[in-house]
Image (cartoon, rainbow, N blue to C red):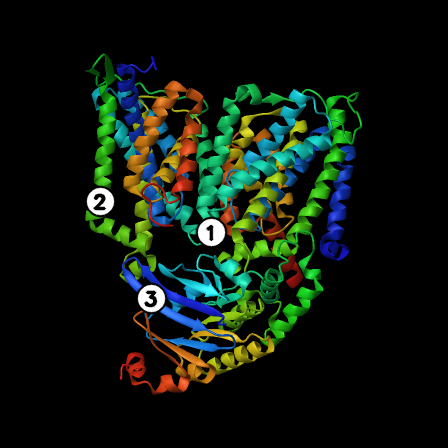
Amino acid sequence: MALLEPSTITILVLTGIFSSSIIFLISAGLQIVFGIQRILNLTVGSFYAIGAYVGITFINFFLKMGFSVVYGLLFLILAGLSLSFLGPTIERGVLNFVYKKEEAFQLLATFGLVLIFEDMIKLIWGSYPQISDFGILTYGEFRFLDTSFPVYYFLVIISAFLIAFLLEFFIKKTRQGKKMRSVADDIEMSEGLGVKVRNIYILSFTIGTVLGTLAGALIIPVTAAVLGMGIEAIVLAFAVVVIAGLGSMRGALLASLIVGLLQAFITFIFPELTTFVIYLIVIAVLLIKPTGLMGKEI
Amino acid sequence: MGLLEVLEVTKYYGDFKALDNVDLKINRDERISIIGPNGAGKTTLLNLISGLLKPTRGKIILEGKNITNMSPSERCKLGIVKSFQIPSYFPNLTTLDNLKVALISSLGKSKNFLKSYQQDEEINNLSERALEVFGLYERRNFLAKDLPHGDKKLLDVASAFALRPKLILLDEPTSGVSIKEKRDLMGTIMSALKEMEISSLILVEHDMDIVFNYSSRVVVLHNGKILDDSSPELVKANKEVASVMFGS
Amino acid sequence: MKKILSGNLFFTLILIALLALVPYIAPPFYVYLTLTSLAYIPVVIGFNILFGYTGLLSFGHGLFLALGMYTTAFLMRNYTMENLEVLILASALSAFIVGLGVGYICVKYTRIYFALLTLAFGMVFYTLLIKFTPITGGDEGLRITFKPLLLGLDFRYLPHLDFLFQPYYYYVLGIVIILTVLAYIIVSSHFGLSLKAIKENSEKAEALGINIKRFRLYSFVISAIYTSIGGALLAHITSHVTPIFSYWTTSGEIVFMTLLGGFTNFFGPIIGVFVYTLLRDFIMSTIIYWRILFGAALLLIIIFVPGGISEGLIRIYKHFKGA
């Protein structure tokens, strides 16, 4: 195809990997909560949206205070982390009441939360798209072949990998992480061994929350914050976790790459077919290997 | 001709060999007990016969027909029915409706879309009679989940019996029931067998009194193999069996 | 037949009489809302045959709603098909075919996987509707520009609203009564009891000889047909069919209406439809932040009264009877 010159391909691959990083953070948020609580937490899309809005508010505030734009990334990360309080609030306030209910109700409870957050955003920030004063070229450009990319892309990609690595380390090596895994394997036995399941639930949900808010905060130099962005994100992240296999972190990394790259290429070639192709893959995966690429047995 | 043949059946769970080349032939009108220490493969054997599991190697033949690859529901239609070790029932249906589900299925009526099941006299009569046989009639309108434990077990067995199977598989029908109630429960089950003209039975049971009182033949499993297969009296006298079973 | 309905017969008759009076006593706006609710009744009844009776949560039922609407609009525009009966049958037929295909795949899974798979199919259909502009009209959807014949009778001389509020209203009411009675018969049948058994304990149902996948598929197809017929009825009311009806938020609305009214009771979803349609309109016209209220309502229902309004009413009834 004439359109796909080497430079175009490079651009598409790089933007693909960039969106993969964002999608990975969101789907990692889904995975961790599903891995521990066995709940498919649609709310993570809302956390992503809130992260974006709060990120913009944060950064515009700091820039107005006279801080240099160089600290922009730091402020965004701060914005994402500052929203961690949502984790325990929602977990104790809502999820706590649905753990014993059927799966369908748990899913619907998070759907209810999505509706609530959707309007809360509208209530606070209004219906107009919000734009940050933090330009994407703040950190300059990187030249490669005939093209150039914002350095910011690389910073986000590196951050995502760093977070993936930290998560892996946390879950595999630390005491809390080991407790989390034991709760995921067998709740009753873990309780018997003195693990406070309640605390583990709060912890895993909070991690899931922060992954979402961070992803939202990090995306804002690239796009505006708009209503409905949370729902769009959840639709993609949901595709990722199904392809990955529910609960699998490494699967999420791989599937995010697949979805992110596909999204970049298909959007370029047949713009309107993106969701269609991604969901065809979802269906194909569910049919061929219902547990996903790297999921455990149902 | 035999009723059921298990031919050179081997079953692996991953690397663990649960059953090792087991051959077993069951004739009509036999009441067979399968005994053996924990992990000997009793429940595995039962699940292979009922179709919940598929063997790694070997065949299962019912009345000359190879049923190795059939699902539980297909085997059920051919006449093999299993009751569960942990009683299995429909918790939010009444006792009566629990039985009706079984009867509707066994009479091939489940695809009747337009007829009210509550006005089906045949189903009503049969289900009420079956409940009487099992002494559950008084509690016919209880939700199954509200029944006492022993009654749940009876309900599970009753719904299996309602299918009028050629061969019934009972997986520890008396587990979780007090010693005193055990005898009553077994007595009820045995009289129901007679009443409902079900003659072939495979029983997995830990209580040796029950095993030796109610079986016509006893099969001893040990480490996935058949150690002994004979009349209750002979098995009782077999020292090797005694050492495996009771460690004496 | 009489005996089946006797418990609910009295209330049902009163409800039907009230519904028949609505065009005469209610302001036009409420007639419109009632008519919309009526069209949604087959939708939620269909959804609940799958959810409440078979235990499968579809998060993609918008697909079948949109299917009925698009089948109707497509046949009217391209083949000037005008008999409403034919349009309804065509919608049912398309739902039968699509439901059989999609259902065949979906019923291999249960629980959350079933919900996810149906959601995915709904989304695929949504993107197809947007993409295949020559057939579907893309983002804009399709407009229905003329009125259908009702039982062969031509009402085209009537202004649009008069048509909707008189002949069409009673036509829809009639169809909905027939479909509701039929659904009631189905769930009270041998088949219906077998579905409940599958929902309650599928392993046991299978052990009793019920072919659970086949039965789930039957339930799926019946559900799809009901929902699609609802779509066919709705299409003439909105006069405009758009891809949004296949989007997951619409599927979510169908779930919400059913839960609101109560999925454990046959009549629950019907109550849910009326309450939801009226409330949504009331709330949406008074506050713009209606999602907060619906989200909160959904949470409260799930946590405190999973059986919805119908369970709540039964609790209140028992309370007073007991006291």
Q: If the image is split into quadrants, where does the C terminus of chain C sit?
A: bottom right
Tell which tag, 1 or 3, sits nearer the viewer: 3
Work out whether residue A105 or residue A80 is closer to the camera in this orientation and state it: A105
Work out whether residue C293 or residue B109 is closer to the camera in this orientation and state it: B109
Residue C87 x, y percent position in the rendering: 68, 30
Residue C257 x, y percent position in the rendering: 58, 41
Find residue A102 and name its label. Answer: 1
Mark 3 = which residue? B19
Q: Is residue B70 left or right of residue A186?
A: right
Tag 2 secondary structure = helix
On whether disc 1 and disc 3 are found on a single subunit, the reply is: no
Label 3 resides on the chain identified as B
Q: For the residue marked with disc 3, what is the amino acid?
A: Leu
Which residue: 53% across, 57% down? C200
On whether disc 3 and disc 2 are found on a single subunit, the reply is: no
Q: Is residue A25 visible?
A: no
Find residue A170 and name its label. Answer: 2
